[in-house]
Structure formats: structure tokens, C-alpha cells
Image (cartoon, helix red, strand yellow):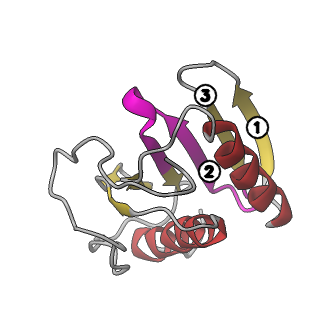
Amino acid sequence: MTDTTMQQAAERADSMLDATLDAIKPAVQWTHGATSTGSCDVSRRRVVMTVISQQRVGNLLGLVQRSWEKAGYRIKSVNKDEKFPAIYAQSSDGYGIALTVGAERQVFFEATTPCVKPSGVTAPTASPNGPAYKYPVPRPNVHSDFWS
């Protein structure tokens, strides 16, 4: 086991999500999803609130996959389902990151940590670039001249 605490691992997961969202140009609006903790791991989530058109889903997936490859992540699998595509990747130090497309083409990002030293975990510190929704997060409701 590593000396990394769950809090430190959560912060690393947050930085992976930050970098992913920063790579999306033009920017999409997002909010935090739920944080979940296991006995020694953490999952952080972000939910895209921008409406993504059927024609732009492939652009978004390709852009994200290229940014992850550039960051040195190994693409573990790609689900090419027309309605619910997804990409799963992993960093060299065992952190996972995924993009999944859900109902109404709502895009979800999740970063997962490897097993680390148990500790408390605080809420993410990054501020969403739109409303900070509480659960349940609504369906995409932000129009973009490019993405929608």
C-alpha cells in the first residue's frame, strides 16, 4: 500500500477531471456529481450540463480520448454504442478515468483511485462553471452554439 491518503488521491482524481474538462474547447458547462468512498478508494464525478447534439458526440469523445492519450493515459476500452458510447482509460499510477454518455446524451466523467491509505475525504474544491446542483442533477439544459 502507498502512503497516499484517500484525501490526496481524491485531489489527484479532481486534477484529472479538471484537466479533462479544460481540454474541451469550446468549454462545456459542468457540475459536480457524487463522491463515493470505499474502504480504501475514492470516486469523483462531474456531470456535463451542456446539451451535446447527436452530431457532436463523436467530436467530444475523440477530443477527450486524444487529450487522455496526450496525458499518457492508456485507453483500456471504448464502447462504440451509438446511443450510450463510453471511453475508459487508466493512468500509469493506477487511477482510472471514464467518459460515459447517458440518457439525452448527458456526459458523465468519473475518476477512480487505486487502493490507498484510509482517511477522511472532503468535498471537491473546484467550483463548477455553472450552477452547483444538488442530487439529483437535472438533464442537460445549457445551449452551446457549437456543442448543441
Considering only vertical position in the picture, is 146 above or below 104?
A: below
- Extent of the magenta region: 91-109
Image-based side of 61 in relation to 74, left or right: left
Disc nearest the viewer among 3 and 1: 3
Image-based side of 130 in relation to 50, left or right: left
- Whether tag 3 and tag 2 are in contact, CB under 8 A, the answer is no
Name the amino acid, label 1: Lys
Disc nearest the viewer among 3 and 2: 3
Q: Secondary structure under badge 2?
A: strand
Residue, x 35% and y 49% (percent of image)? Answer: 38
Which residue is denoted by mark 2 in the rendering? Answer: 96
Q: Secondary structure under badge 1?
A: strand
Q: In the image, residue 112 lies at what x, y percent?
A: 52, 52
Q: Is residue 40 visible?
A: no
Q: Secondary structure under badge 3?
A: loop
Q: In the image, residue 17 lies at what x, y percent?
A: 54, 65
Q: In the image, residue 113 lies at what x, y percent?
A: 53, 57
Circle 1: is it few (<14), some (14-19), or many (20+) Cα within 10 Å?
Answer: few
| Mark closer to the chain start, 2 or 1 | 1
How far is disc 2 from disc 1 in space, using C-alphas?
Answer: 9 Å
Viewer-side residue, 7 vs 97 = 97
Mark number, residue 85: 3
| Mark closer to the chain start, 3 or 1 | 1
Q: In the image, residue 4 lies at what x, y percent?
A: 54, 74
| Mark closer to the chain start, 3 or 2 | 3
Viewer-side residue, 47 vs 50 = 50
Which residue is denoted by mark 1 in the rendering? Answer: 76
Name the amino acid, label 2: Gly
* Label total for image: 3
Considering only vertical position in the picture, is 71 above or below 139?
A: below
Residue, x 47% and y 77% (percent of image)? Answer: 8
